[in-house]
Image (spheres, rainbow, N blue to C red):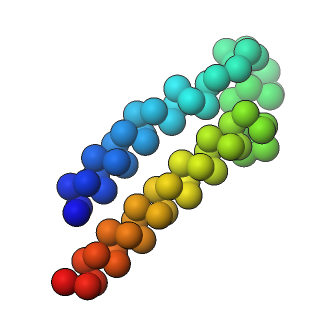
Amino acid sequence: MKKLASIVSMILITILPNALMAHPGHGSHDDSGYTITHYLFEPMHAVVTISCIVFALAVMLYTRKKERSK
């Protein structure tokens, strides 16, 4: 199960940067493009970011539950 969790984590790490750079306006080095608040509060980013975090937590909790049940 650890191998599955590792694979899922690596896939999310690989996909997340591409998903977060999904709208025009990135690449300009003003204050709004590359700040953490932009990624957390911009709706286009927030949905993807929160979904990935929830999915990663669910996988982590599932794997821990499986390990404890052995």
* Quadrant (top left, top right, bottom left, bottom right) of the C terminus: bottom left
Question: Compared to 27, does 41 lie above or below?
Answer: below
User: On the picture, is 22 further left or further right than 17?
Assistant: right
Q: Please state the total of marks drawn on the protein image.
A: 0
* Quadrant (top left, top right, bottom left, bottom right) of the N terminus: bottom left
User: On the picture, is 49 further left or further right than 63?
Assistant: right
Relative image position of residue 14 (x, y in whole percent)? 40, 34
Residue drawn at 30 percent across, 56 percent down: 5
User: On the picture, is 32 further left or further right than 26?
Assistant: right
Residue drawn at 33 percent across, 74 percent down: 64
Relative image position of residue 65 (x, y in whole percent)? 34, 78
**Residue 25 visible:** yes
Residue drawn at 73 percent across, 15 percent down: 24
User: On the picture, is 38 further left or further right than 13?
Assistant: right
The quarter holding residue 37 reads: top right
**Residue 36 visible:** no
Relative image position of residue 10 (x, y in whole percent)? 34, 43
Question: Compared to 31, does 42 lie above or below?
Answer: below
Question: Compared to 20, does 2 lie above or below?
Answer: below
Q: Residue furthest bottom?
A: 69
Residue drawn at 52 percent across, 26 percent down: 18
